């Protein structure tokens, strides 16, 4: 009986935290976009415009094919995951300071605050990416994917990595102001390691390990393998990606759960 009660308590705790995160997501939507319906749509429209703009420019100025692969599809499959990662970084910096007053509520924790922000960015980017993908398909600029399952798997790993990055940046930016100042520059410098605009197979073999050490590059390789099939010659290691992301999650959660004493509530 006691085991049944403890199980019910655990389920109740998960339900409570789920409700808290959903409420925080709605609060974030209202704060950023207002209460109008068009505002709620903008959370997907913003990343869609970014991705569409980059895809149009790259398709216009570059060769139609890169290493035998269509340029539009290369850009979309790379820039959508990249946008997810960069938006998560942007929204995680000083996230606790901006929402510190919410911590006066006993049910709200720092993990809830950052999780709500990261889930919103991840869902919005994926929704925007779907819009851009469908538009490109209608215009004949991209073909149907070779494996939807592999695309979903790659997006899952990219979302996991983006969430982990958000945990780390949010908690560390409260501990030191230096990170807040350099995180934007660091995200730009890290662009070559994301694999957004290049594939592992395109670079000399002795340097491939550099890209393959990046969880983002691994995830994007999976997405492109799902889009292009064997024609992409994708390189990825699912076991490695799981291990790295799991370690980052443990570190990120530990830093986030101990960040309260560093938060300055305005």
Image (spheres, helix red, strand yellow):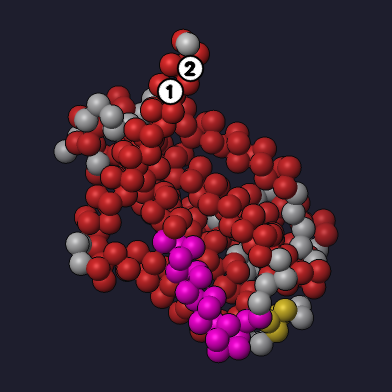
- Residue sitting at x 76%, y 69%: 229
Residue at numbered disc 2: 4
Task: Point out residue 136 in the picture as x, y percentages from the top left corner.
Answer: 55, 82
Q: Is residue 128 visible?
A: yes
Task: Point out residue 238 in the picture as x, y percentages from the top left corner.
Answer: 72, 47
Q: Which mark is residue 8?
A: 1
Q: In front here: 20 or 95?
A: 20
- Residue sitting at x 51%, y 50%: 162
Q: Height in image: 108 above or below 233?
A: above
Is residue 258 located in the magenta-colored stretch of the structure?
no
Q: Which image quarter holds the C terminus?
A: top left
Q: Which residues are magenta?
A: 124-143
Q: Quadrant of residue 33?
A: bottom left
Please tell me whether mark 2 sits on a helix, a strand or a loop.
Answer: helix
Q: Are marks 1 and 2 in contact (CB under 8 Å)?
A: yes
Task: Point out residue 151 in the picture as x, y percentages from the top left corner.
Answer: 64, 62
Please tell me whether mark 1 sits on a helix, a strand or a loop.
Answer: helix
Task: Point out residue 183 in the picture as x, y percentages from the top left corner.
Answer: 43, 50
What is the magenta segment's predominant secondary structure?
Answer: helix
Q: Residues within 10 Å of mark 2 (few under 14, many from 20)?
A: few
């Amino acid at each position: 009986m006691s085991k049944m009660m403890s199980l019910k308590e655990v389920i109740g705790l998960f339900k409570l935290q789920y409700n808290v995160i959903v409420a925080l997501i709605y609060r974030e939507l209202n704060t950023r976009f207002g209460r109008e319906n068009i505002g709620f749509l903008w959370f997907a429209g913003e990343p869609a415009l970014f991705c569409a703009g980059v895809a149009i420019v790259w398709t216009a100025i570059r060769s139609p094919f890169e290493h035998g692969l269509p340029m539009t599809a290369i850009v979309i499959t790379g820039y959508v995951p990249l946008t997810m990662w960069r938006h998560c970084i942007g929204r995680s910096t000083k996230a606790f300071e901006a929402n510190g007053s919410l911590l006066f509520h006993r049910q709200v924790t720092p993990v809830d605050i950052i999780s709500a922000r990261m889930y919103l960015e991840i869902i919005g980017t994926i929704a925007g990416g779907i819009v851009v993908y469908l538009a490109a398909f209608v215009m004949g600029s991209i073909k149907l994917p070779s494996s939807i399952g592999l695309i979903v798997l790659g997006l899952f790993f990219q979302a996991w990595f983006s969430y982990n990055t958000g945990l780390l940046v949010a908690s560390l930016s409260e501990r030191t102001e230096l990170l807040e100042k350099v995180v934007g520059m660091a995200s730009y410098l890290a662009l070559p390691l994301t694999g957004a605009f290049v594939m592992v197979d395109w670079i000399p073999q002795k340097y491939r390990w550099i890209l393959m050490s990046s969880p983002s590059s691994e995830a994007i390789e999976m997405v492109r393998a799902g889009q292009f099939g064997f024609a992409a010659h994708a390189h990825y290691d699912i076991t490695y990606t799981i291990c790295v992301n799991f370690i980052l999650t443990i570190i990120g959660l530990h830093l986030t759960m101990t960040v309260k004493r560093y938060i300055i509530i305005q």
